[in-house]
Image (spheres, grey):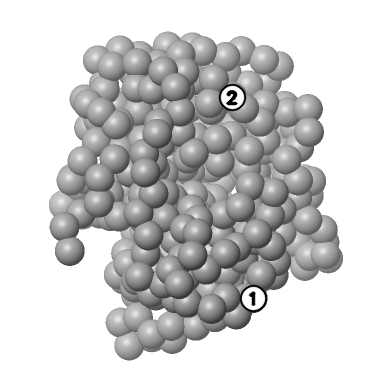
């Protein structure tokens, strides 16, 4: 176990240094990759034969003057008595009276919001498709690295579900958001937090997507208030969060975790393979309790990496470019808005 922890520490610092060196790079849509596969999958399921026509619902911040456009702001807020920081990317096309979608993008253990913005390239896509992206920063865990309290071996000493709720309240107050189109994604430990939010904030966040997610058991279990759309992308060569699981630390096999979500969503069919291309296999569970849906992209030989990222991270294994995780996740989000808003 000590050897495994040492290896993870070295890998974490390796990606940190690499991302710092490449912090000037910006991702793109990985032209030529499977940028529309999420949409094709949705059309092939019984959940949505066409893109849903759900009217937007404006947040209280609509109508206020826009302090910035086409840039990333660095902001703070108070949550649970702790000063928390986050980055917020505003697309050039932002208008104070036109509600836009919001994507929450959570970094992995030992990283930060700036690195996640660079690594995933979500801000470049946001500029093209007109949506906002928030990149929250985790706090220090007992091992001295930043992360999220999504349980597991290194939980942070804060309530990150509360922080996410406080962040959403702040952003909804200050910016013109579409309350039906708020989404969450994350990498590794951030993917674990994304899954936790699916269990705890399902009435505020429309759809959820994790990449190489670390899905530790949750105290009290997972009991979302509605059926939720779930997307997960994982490499079979991931040695940080192994595809076959790691029972010694409580990590389930990814197929088992997906089956549990399919059961939670009331899915009656699946997994059904809807895509095989190169090193990518796409499968889905369908005939779920609306609007639930479980979609998975398996990357054969893929490492603990973000598919389609222009930044190679050899320390963490292979990065596939057959699929753009950023583009696929965004398409999945667009296809799955929140069908209703919780009562005030």
Kindly identify which numbered label has been placed on residue 68. 1
The number of numbered discs placed on residues in the rendered structure image is 2
**Secondary structure of the residue carrying numbered label 2:** helix
Q: Is residue 199 above or below residue 20?
A: above
Which class describes the residues within 10 Å of circle 2: few (<14), some (14-19), or many (20+)? many
What's the distance in space between the residues labelled 2 and 1, CA to CA?
A: 33 Å
User: Which residue corresponds to the image point at 34% horizontal and 16% vertical from the top-left?
Assistant: 46
User: Which residue corresponds to the image point at 66% horizontal and 31% vertical from the top-left?
Assistant: 35
In the depicted view, which residue is nearer to us: 263 or 71? 71
Q: Is residue 307 above or below residue 1?
A: above
**Secondary structure of the residue carrying numbered label 1:** loop
User: Which residue corresponds to the image point at 42% horizontal and 55% vertical from the top-left?
Assistant: 178
Q: Position of residue 212 (x, y in %)?
A: 53, 42
Q: Which residue is mark 2?
A: 37
Foreground mark, 2 or 1, reads: 1
Q: Position of residue 242 (x, y in %)?
A: 51, 37
Q: Is residue 2 visible?
A: no
């Amino acid at each position: 176990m000590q050897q495994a922890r040492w290896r993870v520490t070295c890998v974490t610092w390796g990606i940190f240094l690499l991302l710092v060196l490449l912090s000037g790079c910006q991702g793109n849509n990985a032209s030529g990759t499977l940028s529309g596969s999420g949409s094709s999958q949705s059309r092939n399921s019984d959940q949505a034969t066409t893109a849903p026509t759900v009217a937007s619902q404006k947040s209280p911040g609509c109508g206020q003057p826009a302090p910035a456009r086409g840039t990333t702001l660095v902001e703070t807020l108070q949550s649970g008595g702790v000063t928390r920081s986050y980055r917020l990317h505003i697309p050039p096309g932002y208008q104070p009276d036109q509600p836009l979608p919001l994507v929450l993008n959570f970094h992995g253990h030992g990283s930060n919001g700036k690195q996640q913005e660079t690594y995933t390239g979500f801000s470049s896509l946001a500029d093209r498709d007109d949506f906002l992206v928030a990149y929250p920063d985790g706090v220090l865990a007992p091992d001295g690295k930043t992360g999220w309290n999504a349980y597991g071996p290194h939980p942070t000493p804060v309530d990150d579900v509360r922080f996410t709720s406080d962040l959403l309240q702040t952003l909804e107050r200050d910016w013109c958001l579409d309350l039906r189109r708020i989404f969450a994604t994350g990498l590794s430990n951030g993917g674990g937090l994304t899954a936790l939010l699916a269990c705890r904030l399902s009435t505020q966040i429309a759809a959820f997507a994790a990449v190489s997610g670390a899905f530790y058991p949750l105290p009290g279990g997972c009991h979302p208030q509605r059926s939720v759309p779930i997307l997960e992308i994982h490499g079979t060569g991931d040695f940080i969060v192994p595809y076959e699981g790691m029972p010694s630390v409580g990590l389930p096999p990814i197929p088992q975790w997906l089956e549990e979500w399919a059961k939670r969503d009331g899915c009656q069919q699946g997994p059904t393979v809807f895509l095989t291309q190169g090193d990518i296999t796409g499968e889905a569970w369908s005939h779920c309790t609306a609007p639930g849906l479980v979609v998975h992209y398996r990357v054969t030989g893929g490492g603990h990496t973000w598919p389609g990222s222009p930044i190679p991270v050899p320390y963490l294994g292979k990065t596939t470019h057959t699929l753009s995780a950023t583009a696929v996740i965004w398409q999945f989000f667009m296809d799955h808005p929140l069908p209703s808003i919780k009562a005030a």
